[in-house]
Amino acid sequence: MRYLPHTPEDISAMLEAIGVKSLEDLFPTVPHDCRRTGDLSLPEALTEWELNKHIDKLSNRMAVSPEFKVFLGAGSYDHYIPASVSYLLSRSEFVTSYTPYQPEISQGTLQAIFEYQTLTARLLGMDVANASQYDGASSLAEALLMAVRITRQNKVAVSGLIHPNYRQVIETYFAPTDCEFIELPYTEAGITDLSKINDLENLAAVAVQSPNFFGCIEDLQSSAKKAHDKKALLVVGFTEPLAYGMYKNPGSYDADIACGEGQSLGIPRTFGGPALGMFAAKQKYVRNMPGRLVGQTVDVEGRRGYVLTLATREQHIRREKATSNICTNHSLCALASSMYMASVGGSGFKELARLNYDRCEYLKDRLRKAGYSSPFNRSTFNEFVVQFPQGFETTYQDLLKKKIIAGLPLECYYPELANHYLLCVTETMAKEDMDTLVREVVT
Amino acid sequence: MKELSELNLPDDVRYAESHEWARLEGDKVKVGITDYAQDQLGDIVFVEMPEAGDSFEKGEEFGTVESVKAVSELYMPVGGEIVAVNTDLEDSPERVNNSPYTDGWMIEVKLDDASEMDGLLTNDAYLEKLKG
């Protein structure tokens, strides 16, 4: 599909057809004081080499790996992207493709999305996955709205160990509705305290994230039981799907909806975006799912083909009764992740998960031996919390000058966790860099 | 699509302007959608229904019917408690197309107010409405 700008001739022909003199005549309904009157104040145009220099200068203000040793995760992870992914993704058939609005003519795009859905459903252990949402946060918010539709109840219990930014997005989604959002506290072990659920009625969903924001593996079995005893849906979120190469996936714990962030799977961190909202559910809830769905079928001659299916749930057909006001997806990111999953393969995925786990355990162990332990004793994946001594901020700043980012200070999200840091280690972190961190912290 | 003269509009049911039919059977009323409605919708692929025990007033939405090209709401032609739903439609929603007044029934309602049946249209009156 091509996007060509209009020429001045095109524009005047269109203006003539609708009987107005100028583009300006199209905007009289916009109040005058909402309109810009002067020109934009922009600097002089730069040459290409000047511009490159300027952008380099800007980008050098950021701490980027591999120059910096970045022990930051918290929802965005540094994983190696195989060359096959970058190559395939740069093919023009894929890189120019937008979510298909004239879908059935784009068989290749539909097939690629179908494969993404298949891989996602298998990874999460769910029956059916959609063509993707914007990111982990919007997926989770959509999942909770879906649970409200299915159960016709208006309360959701959300773990306080779901990514703080995700919880903010949920609050934004829920603010104009009459639904209530109850936050569940966490236990000394660093997992969600489910006991509060007993006292809640009219519950539509229980939402937990596993691995949670502290990197700890949640007790999904108990979460499922608590949710289902209350006739609520269990929504399992995640920021690090690679964990399911090692730990049991949401589907094996009878999750009703599994959704989260897929950035880990072949998408660079690129300053926080673009991201990939993975979204999967049980088959019986398919009609209540948000977003687009690609299905496989046969044509009149019995040949395999792909279609957008169940489109009657979508807003361009069903208006205000649609399951969601999102009927687009992050196609290119979804394709990147399916290329990644296919490139790494089933056994490779498990090996990679193990490698990540082992690396992270190495740092955890080294820090423990140096006297810095985690307050939480639960199993973790890729990330863990460490309590550093009071006044560690100064060390943190010194390390930054040495191009080491010693994790995420948790106090701004959890005021009770002063001097606690969330450290992340993936397969790209070298042993010597971890040794350096430990040495620097000790001295 | 059918001509109005081809429509099957039996006289043992009453019709709502929102294209549902209601048939009094003892003290209960069976409800479905009319031949006109199923014909307009085309191939029906899913019927979302309430649960037995739910109660709705006349005119309230009790479910949705989804065809290959649209989703439409279903409205109660009379008010009352749902005593049964046609679970056969879960696996064979095409029954609504094939036999809208028999196998394709949707819900059975225990009437709140028997006089509500009198407010519904006869087959002739419904046909007049369709003619516009």
Image: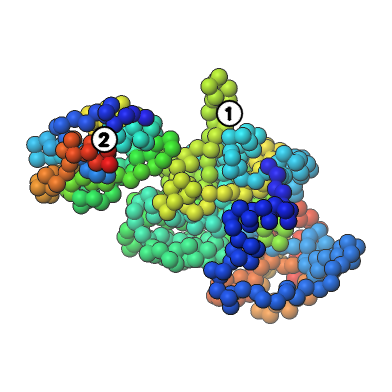
Give the secondary structure at mark 2.
loop
Total of numbered circles in the picture? Answer: 2
Which one is in front in this view, the residue at disc 1 or the one at disc 2?
2
Name the residue nearer the viewer: A218 or A114: A114
- Residue A166, x across and y down, in percent: 54, 62
Q: Give the residue displayed 39% in from the left and 36% down from the top.
A: B67
Which amino acid is tagged 1? Answer: Gly
- Residue B53, x across and y down, in percent: 21, 47
Residue A147 visible (yes or no)? no
Give the secondary structure at mark 1.
strand
Label 2 chain ID: B
Name the residue nearer the viewer: A405 or B81: B81
Q: Give the residue displayed 48% in from the left and 41% down from the top.
A: A311
Q: Mark 2 — residue?
A: B34
Within 10 angstroms of label 1, few (less than 14), some, or many (20 or more) residues?
some
Q: Is residue B26 depicted above or below A159 in this figure? A: above
Q: Along the horizontal axis of the image, is A374 left or right of B54? A: right
Q: Mark 1 — residue?
A: A305
- Residue A2, x across and y down, in percent: 70, 44
Q: Give the residue displayed 66% in from the left and 79% down from the top.
A: A390
The C terminus of chain A sits in image quarter: bottom right
